[in-house]
Image (cartoon, grey):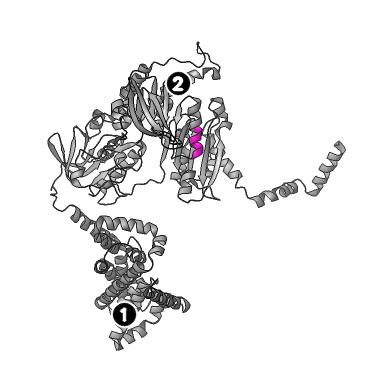
């Protein structure tokens, strides 16, 4: 470190030491000012320029060194100098002090500030990158962060010093005016009756409403910048246009129509989206058929005879796949155009194109609208592996067209979709090879969860190839072959008849006008939205798989409420989307269900936790059902019953988990679950038993040590003990 930096550090430490040693904070209080108010006023009248100079110097030093009391000094400035003069002195002093703190941070405190304010730094850097100096203006106008944090963190950004000074001066001016005005009123209080003076009441009202006013001003300024050059219609055809009729779009349109809004729902293909046609519904129908085939093989476990060879079942594969279509057809009316039309939604079939934030084109017709909701979903991701197009492949979109049963199937992907399909097709008599780059299935779950599922897969004959990387697809005659490398970087060849891709999904963000509007995307390809699900344009919202961060049907429906309410009534109040309690399940056998944190999440986030566990193999109902396997574990705050998360592995885990979802949503702990009557015999008793295990581990030891004495006392004390001993001796 050079001499200049050492000198600056010495000055800072000296001033800070004096501030602490002499307890100078007592002089930066409103009580001290009130006690010396007359003396300050007299000195100002006698020495106006010296008074201003001393005040400015103190203000600059306090702000530059981030001493507490800047707000008090602002009030004092108004009380001593009046509104106009006080505003001038405080405005320049606060800006100079903030700039000095900015420079100190830039030159001396880079590592310290980064470590201490890393979270704030991340969000501010992102804001600077997106909006530049306008973002700093917003922070100054609407204090989202303490000014001390802004001063220090901004020193670590590329913003120029001159730019920082003038933007800070302008941005802080309205807030400074409010505080200085409040100070002029505080300075006039001579008695308790002065507290109720109209001027002071108005000052406090200003202090309360200023952040709201400032926020409105920033919203207007940002909107003016974003919507520049866009012709806003004086009248609109609809209140809301929803693009995409999957779960998110359907629920958005339903809520909008329920509030009597005029809403248009545009779908290019089939109502119901992926969930109904290619996702949740068909996959669960397939899983059910596969589960029944497995029960048929296990018939002897239940004392039943299949009439043939034990463990054998004839699978009519075509009939299974046709049944899936029958299930879809039965559910279709729930999401049909007819139903939603009856509910007041204008359903349109066609390709939507967003012309601008207020206009959507479909079927050569332009619809003007106050709000647009993008709910275009996602599609299966196809990895760029050499030769994959030549061998051919299926995805969750095309799988359901399959009618001829393949002898073998290669499934790429070890996530929930890949696991559900692998087990189902294996149970339907297809030899399945499941390949993944990672060392275990279901990597988002804890290792013991993954191992439980893997063991079942191996028992049922699935050929697991973990730690394998796909290199190339080739054809040898009529045979399809995958060339891959194992964990030892050894090349292997896997033969297969049918390839199913289950390596993730990609948001549908092209083909309907987003590119022309320059709506930014996240690194994973989803549309970038704020906490209110708004895009770059505040009247254009996105929800469901196209927005993330979760790709679940139930989270899409959850987001839909926010897009509908914020879009239609956001001028009065907007609601931040709540992701605090999000459950999900993987419908393998055993099922895996989770809500909140698991152990690996808690470790990664450095969150302390305790684990309470219960083995479902000990549950009466599970034993009776022949499903005595799996476990439940609940993470709680150390020493408390507050639930951080729950994971269930076992039969009907997706249903059992609901009790924990409800508990976490409404702030209920394990004591409440323990005190709730559960029907016997049911699988939900697992929740009570794991709560009981937690309770046993948290019994007060001191009280338990005293209980034997208490019980002996209630039996008569030592005399009872002597009698019992005599009886025992006579017996012996």
Asked if 621 appears above or below 732 in the picture, the reply is above
Is 671 inside the magenta-drawn segment?
A: no
Asked if 681 appears above or below 105 in the picture, the reply is above
Q: Earlier in the sequence, mark 2 or mark 1?
A: 1
The location of residue 227, given as percent across then percent down, is: 17, 52
- Tell me the quarter of the image containing the C terminus: top right
The location of residue 77, given as percent across then percent down, is: 31, 77
Which residue is at the far right?
730
Which residue is at the far top?
307
* Residue denoted by label 2: 292
* Residue denoted by label 1: 80
Q: Is residue 275 visible?
A: yes
Q: Nearer the viewer, residue 220 or 603?
A: 603
Asked if 132 appears above or below 556 in the picture, the reply is below
Q: Is residue 627 left or right of residue 7?
A: right
Is 450 inside the magenta-drawn segment?
A: yes
Q: Identify the mark at residue 68; answer none if there is no mark.
A: none
The location of residue 157, given as percent across then percent down, is: 31, 62
Total numbered labels:
2
Label 2: element kind: helix
Q: In front: mark 2 or mark 1?
A: 2
Q: Quadrant of residue 361?
A: top left
Magenta region, main secondary structure: helix
Which residue is at the far front?
490
The location of residue 650, given as percent across then percent down, is: 50, 32
Q: What span is colored magenta in the figure? A: 444-452
Q: Is residue 650 visible?
A: no
Q: Is residue 546 left or right of residue 717?
A: left
- What's the CA distance linking mark 2 and mark 1? 85 Å
Q: Decide: few, some or many residues near mark 1? Use Cα within 10 Å; few <14, some 14-19, many ≥20.
A: many
Q: Nearer the viewer, residue 479 or 338?
A: 479
């Amino acid at each position: 470190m050079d001499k200049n930096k050492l000198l600056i550090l010495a000055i800072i430490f000296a001033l800070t030491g004096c501030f602490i040693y002499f307890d100078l904070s007592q002089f930066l209080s409103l009580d001290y000012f009130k006690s010396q108010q007359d003396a300050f006023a007299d000195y100002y009248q006698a020495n106006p320029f010296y008074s201003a100079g001393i005040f400015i110097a103190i203000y600059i030093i306090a702000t530059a060194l981030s001493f507490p009391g800047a707000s008090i000094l602002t009030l004092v400035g108004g009380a001593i100098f009046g509104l106009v003069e006080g505003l001038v002195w405080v405005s320049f002093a606060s800006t100079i002090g903030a700039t000095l703190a900015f420079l100190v941070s830039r030159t001396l405190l880079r590592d310290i500030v980064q470590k201490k304010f890393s979270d704030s730094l991340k969000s501010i850097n992102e804001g600077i990158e997106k909006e530049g100096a306008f973002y700093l203006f917003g922070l100054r106008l609407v204090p989202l962060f303490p000014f001390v944090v802004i001063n220090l963190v901004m020193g670590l950004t590329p913003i120029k010093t001159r730019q920082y000074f003038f933007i800070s001066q302008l941005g802080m001016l309205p807030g400074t005016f409010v505080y200085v005005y409040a100070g002029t009123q505080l300075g006039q209080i001579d008695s308790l009756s002065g507290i109720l003076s109209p001027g002071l009441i108005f000052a406090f009202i200003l202090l309360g409403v200023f952040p709201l006013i400032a926020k409105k001003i920033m919203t207007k300024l940002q909107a003016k910048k974003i919507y520049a050059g866009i012709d806003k219609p004086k009248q609109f055809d609809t209140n809301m246009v929803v693009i995409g009729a999957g779960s998110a779009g359907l629920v958005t349109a339903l809520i909008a129509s329920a509030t009597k809004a005029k809403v248009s729902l545009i779908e290019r293909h089939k109502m119901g989206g992926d969930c109904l046609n290619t996702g949740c519904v068909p996959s669960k129908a397939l899983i059910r058929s596969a589960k029944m085939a497995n029960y048929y093989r296990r018939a002897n476990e239940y004392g039943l005879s299949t009439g043939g060879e034990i463990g054998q079942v004839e699978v009519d594969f075509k009939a299974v796949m046709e049944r899936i279509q029958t299930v879809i057809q039965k559910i279709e009316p729930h999401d049909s155009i007819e139903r939603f039309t009856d509910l007041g939604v204008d359903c349109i079939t066609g390709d939507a194109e967003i012309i601008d934030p207020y206009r959507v084109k479909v079927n050569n017709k332009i619809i003007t609208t106050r709000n647009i909701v993008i709910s275009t979903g996602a599609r299966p991701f196809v990895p760029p592996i050499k030769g994959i197009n030549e061998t051919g492949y299926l995805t969750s979109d095309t799988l359901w067209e399959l009618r001829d049963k393949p002898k073998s199937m290669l499934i790429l992907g070890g996530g929930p979709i890949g696991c559900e399909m692998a087990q189902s097709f294996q149970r339907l008599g297809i030899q399945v090879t499941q390949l993944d780059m990672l060392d275990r299935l279901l990597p988002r779950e804890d290792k013991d969860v993954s191992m439980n599922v893997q063991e079942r897969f191996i028992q049922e004959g699935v050929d697991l190839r973990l730690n394998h990387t796909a290199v190339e697809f080739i054809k040898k005659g009529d045979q399809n072959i995958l060339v891959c490398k194992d964990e030892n970087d050894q090349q292997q060849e896997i033969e297969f008849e049918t390839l199913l891709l289950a390596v993730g999904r990609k948001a549908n963000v092209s083909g309907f006008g987003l590119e022309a509007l320059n709506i930014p995307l996240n690194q994973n390809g989803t549309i970038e939205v704020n906490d209110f699900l708004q895009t770059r344009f505040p009247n254009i919202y996105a929800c469901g798989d196209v927005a993330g961060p979760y790709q679940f049907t139930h989270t899409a429906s959850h987001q839909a409420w926010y897009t509908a309410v914020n879009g239609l009534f956001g001028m009065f109040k907007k609601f931040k989307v709540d992701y605090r309690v999000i459950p999900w399940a993987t419908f393998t056998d055993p099922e895996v269900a989770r809500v909140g944190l698991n152990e690996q999440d808690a470790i990664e986030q450095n969150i302390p936790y305790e684990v309470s566990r219960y083995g479902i193999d000990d549950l009466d109902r599970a034993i009776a059902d022949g499903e005595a396997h799996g476990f439940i574990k609940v993470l709680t705050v150390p020493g408390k019953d507050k639930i951080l998360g729950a994971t269930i592995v076992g039969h009907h885990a997706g249903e059992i988990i609901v009790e924990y979802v409800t508990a976490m949503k409404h702030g209920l702990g394990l004591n409440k679950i323990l005190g709730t009557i559960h029907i016997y015999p049911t699988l939900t008793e697992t929740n009570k038993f794991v709560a009981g295990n937690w309770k046993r581990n948290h019994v007060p030891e001191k009280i338990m040590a005293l209980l034997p004495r208490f019980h002996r006392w209630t039996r008569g004390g030592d005399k009872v003990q002597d009698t019992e001993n005599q009886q025992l001796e006579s017996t012996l």
